[in-house]
Every structure is written in structure tokens, then in C-alpha cells.
Image: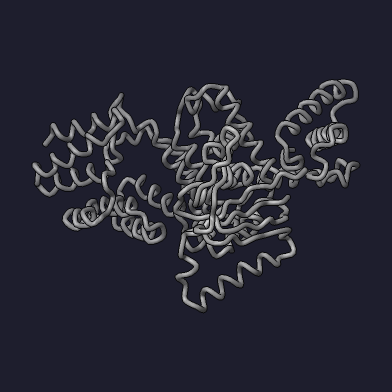
Amino acid sequence: MVGLLRDFDLAEEATQEAFAAAAERWPRTGPPANPRAWLMTTARNRAIDRIRRERTLERKLPLLDTPDAMEEEIDDRAIADERLELIFACCHPALSTEAQVALTLRALGGLSTLQIARAFIVSEETMKRRLSRAKAKIKATGIPFEVPAPHLLPDRLDAVLGVIYLIYNEGYSGRVDLAAEAIRLDVLLAGLMPDEPEAHGLLALMMLHHARRHARFAGEDLVLLADQDRDLWDESEIAAARAILERALALRGRGAYVLQAAIASLQTEPQIDWAEVTELYGELAELTGSPIVELNRAVAICENGSPERALALVDSLELGDYRYLHSTRGELLRRLGRPEDARAAYRRALELSSSRAEQRFLERRLDEL
Amino acid sequence: MKYALLVYSKPGSHESLGEVEREQATSEYMALANDSRVASSAQLQPIETATTVRVQNGRTLTTDGPFADTKEVFGGYYVLDAANIDEAIDAASRIPAARMEGSIEVRPVVEH
């Protein structure tokens, strides 16, 4: 509805009126053959009536040309296209990232404004304002409800996936399971764009992480991958994720999310093929140019049996005061039998850490030295 | 919808181009000015020619220079009639200043 009307509030009101009309009529007349299509037509007609009365959005609404559209013309394909258009509009780069996240959760995640506010630890008023400013910007600046043209699509899809991944990384917050919401959103997106390997890649990546969430902490303590209790892993989610990854690879996906998912998948094997992981990190590093990826590659190199090469790589990276740089150095130096240097590195990492769980982990490492 | 494309350039970036590249860039600016979707456009003279006017307490204060000393300098504008912001963004991205460390601000015009 929103895509058709380019106006969230109008769409909401018209939809509510349509539901009210259904609630009033259907008990008497019985439900129509295609209830969704009936609701859409009714909502659209209500909206048209209002617009004709208010005259404010006339020139923006293509549907004014076809006010008597038949029910049969609106089918699930149209609804699917609309949702895709909605996703791209919500994640348009002209909106701030905050706005993109809030709008996506509201329009597609089906979360209430209060739930979104709780999840991001702001007041409901603040979130209401953020959402209405975003909607106002969409209207005022002519952000289109369209799937982007082919030459724009890769970047725009990347932006959508970025928003979804951002939501995922918020995790469980304010009684809202944002990780689950993000997965749901990507399931929707991958269903709407089945030929886009990165959409599947991100989904596989999130599911692989999600499957291990109960093993990540023992009480308040961080548990590293190698030490995790695999009985706490959701094996069916891992299997489902691997199937999705296969689909992405079959589509010849070799993008950043597919690569990260492939790495995560390898890391959930009983015996980790660190040589293969190293290769994949290498491919990812070339693709993204990211020193953080290089840092992860160094870890893989170490696990593959070359801690000296790993340390040399780490020391060549320009990562300033990135705390994982120092914690990684600490680990490498520990394995190389240089406890004093390791201690210095762990201490630096401790200074830079803001997470209590991480701090406890680093303190334990220091004690063990 | 009409969009203003406000061109901010890194000072000297256009002038320091080689002759061929400078001509190429100039022709790109002119091509956009002649685009059928562009209702109006203007190139402003260099920043040294700017004068700033304010009125305070009924008195007109005139000072030499632009209203603010900024790294990028406002050099001109286009008013473009486009279907949506993506079309405006596309046109903005082709403005030479955008790829020479400048920025193009894209803002819808109030239409009465």
C-alpha cells in the first residue's frame, strides 16, 4: 500500500479503514475469493476518496489514472513487488542510517514504534519523531518506491543488506529480538530476490552465528569458538544455513557476505580447515581492502600453524587502537612464548575494551600468563 | 519534482587540470546546462569576487568575502526537473566537481 500511495500515514489510515470495512461486511456477505486483493482494492479506493477530498497528493499518485482497477489485477506478485520497492525506499541512501533502520523495522519488520524505541533504548516520542522525519523526507525529496535500475542495484542492495546486518548485530535488546527480526527480513528479501547471491549469503551468515548464540557465553564469560559446547548449537539452523549458502554458491556468489558465510560454515565443522579459511579471508581481503579482514586472516594463518607469519602480518596492519588488534597480538605473542610482550598487548586491549565480558576474558588471559 | 543541484568545488581543482581535461570538464558543465530537464543554471564568478551583506539593527553591514570560509567553495547551481531523487542524484554524480573532491548538494525546490 505504501508503495502505491507514497505516503505512509495515508496508507495506514486507508488500510485501517479497509480492515474496518471487512470486519463489518464479511460476517454478513462472507469473505471474498481473494481477501488480500479485496483489502488492497478497498484500501486503495478509500485512499483515492480521501485524496480527491484533500487534493494534496494528486500529482504523485499514478493510480489516479485507474481508479476502477479490478480485484483480479492485484495478486500476490504485485504485493511482492510492492514489498521489495518498500525495502529499497526504506534503505535509500538519502536517509540517515538511523532512519533506514527504524523505517525498515517499522514498515517491514512489523514492530511497533514502542518496540523499536525499546530496542534502541530511546523514548517512544524520540522514535516517533525519527520515523515521521524519515517519512517526511521520503515525501519531500521524492525518494522513489522502485527497485533500483540495474546499474544502481548492486550498491543499493548492498545498502539494504547493510541495514539488515546492522539490525542483526543489535541482537537481543530492550526485550526485542532484533537478531531474529533481521533474519526474518533477509528471508523476506531473499524470497523476493531469489537470484541475488549476497541476499542468501547474508542470511546464511546470520543463521550460522545465530545457531551458536547459546554457546557464546558461560554465565558472564565469553567463550571462544574453539571452546564452545557444541551441544548448545542449533544443528538444524546450521544445516538450513549451509543449504542457503549452497544456493548462493550455486548462483556463483563470491561477494563479501557469501565469503563470510563460507568462512563461518567452515568454522562450524568439527575439524576446521584453516588452510581453506585462510584462502577465503584472502579473497575477502582483496575484495574489501579491509585491514580488519587481514587481521582475521592472520588469526587463520596462526591456527594453520604459522604464528610468526601471523604476527608479521598483524604488525604490518594500520589499525591504530583497534582493540582486537591488541588482543590478537597478545594471543600470538603468548603462543610464540613471549609472555612479557603478550602481557603488554593484553593490557592495551583491556584499556580499549568497553565490554565487561571482554574485559573479564582479557583479565583471565593475563592471569594465565 | 524540481531539484537544486548546488555545486561545491575544491578551490583550484578545475584550474589545475591539464588543458584537455579542463576543456572536457567545461563541456560537461555546459552539456548539463543545456539539458532539457534543466530549467535554470548559473556559474558564479570566483570566491574572491564575493561580498556578504547582513542587516543588523537597521544597518546594512557589508563585508569582503563569502559568508563562511569553507574548504569547498560554492561555485554554481542547476535547477533540474527530475522524476525522483535518484534521477537528480545521477545527474549530480556526473558533475565534474563531484569527482574532483567537491560535493554536490541536492535539495528539492519549493514549488508554489
Is residue B108 toward the left or the right of residue A125 in the image? right
> At which x and y percent is residue A349?
22, 38
Of residue A307 and residue A326, the one placed in the foreground of this image is A326
Of residue A349 and residue A23, the one placed in the foreground of this image is A349
Residue A190 seen:
yes
Q: Residue at x 8, y 42 (%)?
A: A340
Of residue A135 and residue A167, the one placed in the foreground of this image is A135
Q: Residue at x 55, y 25 (%)?
A: A126
Q: Quadrant of the N terminus of chain A?
A: top right
Is B27 situated above or below A14?
below
Is residue A44 toward the left or the right of residue A242 in the image? right
> At which x and y percent is residue A257?
46, 51
* Extreme residue in the front direction: B59
Is residue A59 toward the left or the right of residue A275 in the image? right
Of residue A177 and residue A317, the one placed in the foreground of this image is A317
Residue A33 seen:
no
Dividing the picture into quarters, in which one does residue A14 lie?
top right
Is residue A210 toward the left or the right of residue A359 in the image? right
Q: Quadrant of the C terminus of chain A?
A: top left
Dividing the picture into quarters, in which one does residue A353 lie?
top left
